[in-house]
Image (cartoon, rainbow, N blue to C red):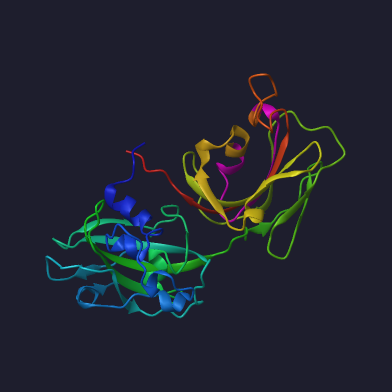
Amino acid sequence: MRIRSLAALSITAIAALSLAGCTGSSEPDASPSAEVSDLCSAAVASGDASNAVSVSGDFGSMPEDVTFETPLDIADLESTIVTEGTGEAVSAGDFVSYGIAVYNSETGELVDSVGYEEGSFLPQQVSPQAAFGQIFGCAPIGTRAVATFPATDSSAAGVYVIDALEIVPTAAWGEEQTPADGFPTVVLDDDGAPTITIPDTDAPTDVELDTLKLGDGPVVESGDTVLVQYTGVQWSDGTVFDSSWESGTPTSFVTTQVVPGFQQALEGQTVGSQVLVVIPPEFGYGEASEDNTNALAGETLVFVVDILGTQHAVTE
């Protein structure tokens, strides 16, 4: 397995960049554009650099041709709308999937692309301070934009063609399945947050899985980075010990960096699915001992996990 190329790392990084980061400033930008609460007002202006880029090809697919006079002088983050979408307007806090193609501002050559194939890029949360919010503002889904990024200490200047593909739900959307007998019961509130009730039986000694909703998205593979919602309770008393729902937003992590039982609940599942998993101590945090004082040691754990996105690991 290898680390994704520098260009693709830059692609991922722009989701979290502020305007100050894009301009290469070492100090936070105190301008109103860095502090706006209204997503529509967050959109940066077009300019000579972004307006100089010509794009052809269908929205939702890799651009067929991206041309501009080289070298292109890029001093500021600029954004020009190429195609105005007709879909749902994006709001701050939404998770949006994107297709992105990056071009060298010195040569005009394609450097890298991501997001046009399923499982290649996680949905990104939109905010007025993040680069995607500043590129699109509250433009609707279906919008294609050209963004010109100036050089920073860690990346070269670049021309980005970005398609806002869809708003991704923050709860599993798959087809409901008939729950298996003997498992904890799950009731969802209006937002999709689960309440888990433990049955009056002994805890299982092996990892047990039940798919509550079956999604139609890409399959989660070992080593993927996933975007999920989850709630975890203890079998012993039903106490909630961790929940992304309670923290207020989905979270992401690599499947190989969680306890083995949780990893089994993710890998092989499809995006859009909701999975119930029961994890005995052997596949969780182990048995309690003098050397293992984790608060969850010795506990059988129950998770309900909504799988919202996956980004496959890049291999040689």
134 to the left or right of 270: left
In the rendered image, residue 62, in percent from the top left (x then y), is placed at: 31, 64
From the top left corner, tell me how far across and down residue 242 is, in percent: 66, 45
Residue 267 forms part of the magenta stretch = yes
What x and y, as percent, mark residue 314?
37, 43
Residue at the farthest right position: 200
Nearest the camera: 155 or 270? 155
- Tell me the residue at 18%/60% (across/down): 109
Q: Quadrant of residue 276?
A: top right
Residue 225 inside the magenta-drawn segment: no
Where 103 falls versus 287 (above or below)? below
Is residue 78 visible in the rendered image? The answer is yes
Residue 269: image location, x then y, percent: 58, 46
Range of magenta residues: 264-282
Q: Is residue 201 above or below residue 95?
A: above
In depth, the one of 127 and 28 nearer the eye is 28
Taking depth in this image into account, of 231 and 143 the one nearest to the observer is: 231
Residue beneath the point at 63% across and 35% down: 261
- The answer to whether residue 159 is left or right of residue 86 is left
The image shows residue 10, relative to residue 255, as above or below, that is: below
Quadrant hosting residue 51: bottom left
Q: Looking at the figure, which quarter contains the N terminus?
A: top left
